Image: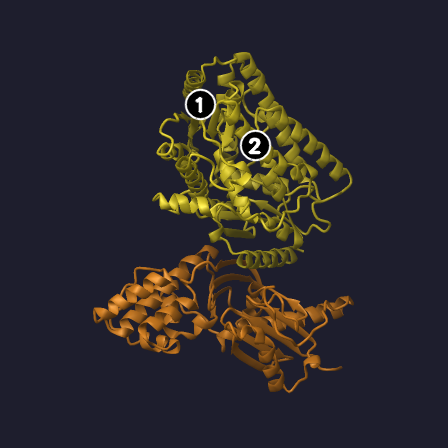
Chain colours: A orange, B yellow
Amino acid sequence: MKSQYFAGVDIGSTMTKVVIMNLAMLASVIGPTGPEHRKLANKVMEEALAQANLPFDGITYVVATGYGRINVPFADKQITEISCHARGVSYLLPEARTVIDIGGQDCKGIKLDNGRAVDFVMNDKCAAGTGRFLEVTAEGLGVKLEDMGRLSLEAKSKVEIGSTCTVFAAQEVVARLSEGVPLPDIIAGLHDAIAARIYSMVRRLAIEREVALTGGGAKNIGLVKALEAKLGFPVLLPPEPLLTGAIGAALLGKDIVKQAAESGTPLPKRERRLQEATLFT
Amino acid sequence: MTEEKKKRRTATEAAAKIGPMVKAMIASVLQARDEGKPIAYTFICCCYDEIIRAMDIVPHWVENYAGICGAKRDAQRFLERAESESFSRSLCTYALCGLGFDAWREGLGEMPPDAPWGGQARPDMMLGSGQILCDPRNKWYQAAQQYMPDVPVYNVGLPWPPYENDYDYREVQDYYVEYIVEELKGLVAFLEKHTGKKMDWNRLSELVDLTDRTWNLIWETYELRRAVPCPMGTGDAMNTMVPIVFMMATQQAYDFFKELNEELRHKIANKEGEIPDEKYRLIWGGGLPSWFALTDFNYFNSKGAVFPVETTYRMVEAVYNFDVDLSKISDPLEHIAWRWLKYWTYWYDKARKRPGSHPDVERLIQYIEDYKIDGVVMHEAFSCRTWHVGLIWQLNRLKKIYRDIPSLILESDIVDISSYNEADTRARIDAFIDTLEAVKSKER
């Protein structure tokens, strides 16, 4: 029997992620979505195909997910990021019952049951509690985003950031800097503020252990520690937190193909074209 | 002025007639202004519809007009005007829209340019409704008097006994009725004074009877929506609320529901659902809708979801189900008072029987069972504090004492479109449908 390959494409507000899988992961590429790049999701796909050494028509099924999933011409199906994260986390961390995904411009809490999402909460209205909050404040502090986590661990005395509004918090940070508060103390305070915001939202789900943390926020060790402090127990982290949605998308594609074969029904497929994603028309 | 871009698709012919009916209603108020008939600003669910109709007072429903501005996506300029008058944007946006409009109209001495459907007519009186529904119902007109100091306000106190799980309100119900009757007498006296006309008590009794019959007919009509497939959803009910809350005590409201009743019976007989392939049955479990985004109901439909029932705007019960026989209460004011009291306490007895329950939660449970509901959708309109506070509590309580039913909280506003993001809203709906499917497939 011919080998089957499944691709998951997760077009987030900040990053585009593609994985190609058969029995295991063959390729994974993470590229920026950004205003100029968002039409170039096909390029990220091409890079992944090259990594897996496969032609595009060698992919059995492509599932797109994420904020920009709507008009991806090279996908057979679109599935919500909630379902894809649920599937991806259940595959990577089967013991997880709750997922907290901290994305570039939104934050989600997902309750899992038997590998599927049975409840969720989302914050997509406000930058507080998302990666954007950290981006804006990192810029205000003159610190690289990727250094924020490490620096916060050096804090001696965390400052309290009163505002959860991104704009006001950025102002507060400048004020603290001018008062001479050490940088690590400010950054640790910021992590506490964002963790409090996320925790208050996710609590609506009646959090069950184990809790998996995904998305860009899971790559920030300071934020992870702050969230663990709020939760009162350690969280689980996937090997690459940015890829869980794309992995879930690929796995759901695999499930669809398997289900169609078992039931003898035609595979729900579109005529795929490896072209630019037009996103929202 | 910007018109709503996409027209919402209705399931019933009756619901499709509502737009022109509302337009005609607004035009009739403007005509009344020209003809010198007395006009009163009023609120929905005011309880005294029959009284103002019997006194030939033309009601202008201020919440309705703000909703029209919202639905036409033309509310922002009135909200901004209210903000420039130093009102906070976090207040009720119905009130802000109305106050902004009034401030503009009074400043100009004429209607604001391109006022939706001709505009909100200057009233001769403003009839508040000081009940425990929401604070704008007695504060809005107080604020409006800044622009119309010559227009008198009358606030009618309309209480009902708060729910206590270990206490039967019937011990005090006679006091409540007595109080409400006195308040209504005060309203009649106020109206007689300001119109120079005497109340026609026989006519009032006729209208009270018409209202009872209309309540029964509405209840019976909405109960038809239990059918599978569901012939009419909440999207349509956001239209058919118009005769319930803006046309009560009129033959037009009764006739509308007679027609709707017949239409639904016909659809049910032909197994004609709102959508051809009904997969999920949902309840609109609370919150006022985003008037500018009613097409979201069509979006739910496109995913196989229907709303056979809602708690919002279903502000009637069958009066023959009350524990008092209203037909034996001949005094019209007393009759109105008892109907009011029994409506608001209708779910109290049921709630007391289930440990940890509450009337609002009990109502949800009953509807979930009667209408075979798979999931609950609620809307947190940021500017509606009255609904906002209780919604999450109700949902949590429902899940605790009944079952862990899938739920979705939408977040936006009733009028303020700046609070709304279509892409995000629909992403939430998509995710909710996924969870419904996950739960259903687990139950299979």
User: Is residue A9 depicted above or below B130 in this figure?
Assistant: below
Residue A63 image-quadrant placement: bottom right
The disc at residue A136 is none
Subunit that carries the residue with mark 2: B
> What amino acid does circle 2 point to?
Ala
Sooner in the amino-acid sequence: mark 1 or mark 2:
2
A199 sits left or right of A113 in the view: left
Which residue corresponds to mark 2?
B27
Tag 1's secondary structure?
helix
On the image, the x and y values in percent for residue B201 come to 52, 13
* Total numbered labels placed on residues in the image: 2
Q: Please tell me how crowded label 1 is: few (under 14), some (14-19), or many (20+) other residues with Cα within 10 Å.
A: some
B37 sits left or right of B233 in the view: left
Q: In which quarter of the image is the C terminus of chain B?
A: bottom right
Query: CB of mark 1 within 8 Å of CB of mark 2?
Result: no
Subunit that carries the residue with mark 1: B
On the image, the x and y values in percent for residue A32 come to 50, 76
User: Is residue A48 depicted above or below A129 in this figure?
Assistant: below
Which residue corresponds to mark 1?
B173
Q: Please tell me how crowded label 2 is: few (under 14), some (14-19), or many (20+) other residues with Cα within 10 Å.
A: some
Residue A83 image-quadrant placement: bottom right
> What amino acid does circle 1 point to?
Gln
Q: Is residue B400 visible?
A: no
Q: Name the foreground residue: A197 vs A207.
A: A197
Residue B218 image-quadrant placement: top right
Residue at horizontal 56%, vertical 41%? B365
A279 sits left or right of B171 in the view: right
As drawn, the residue found furthest toward the left would be: A179
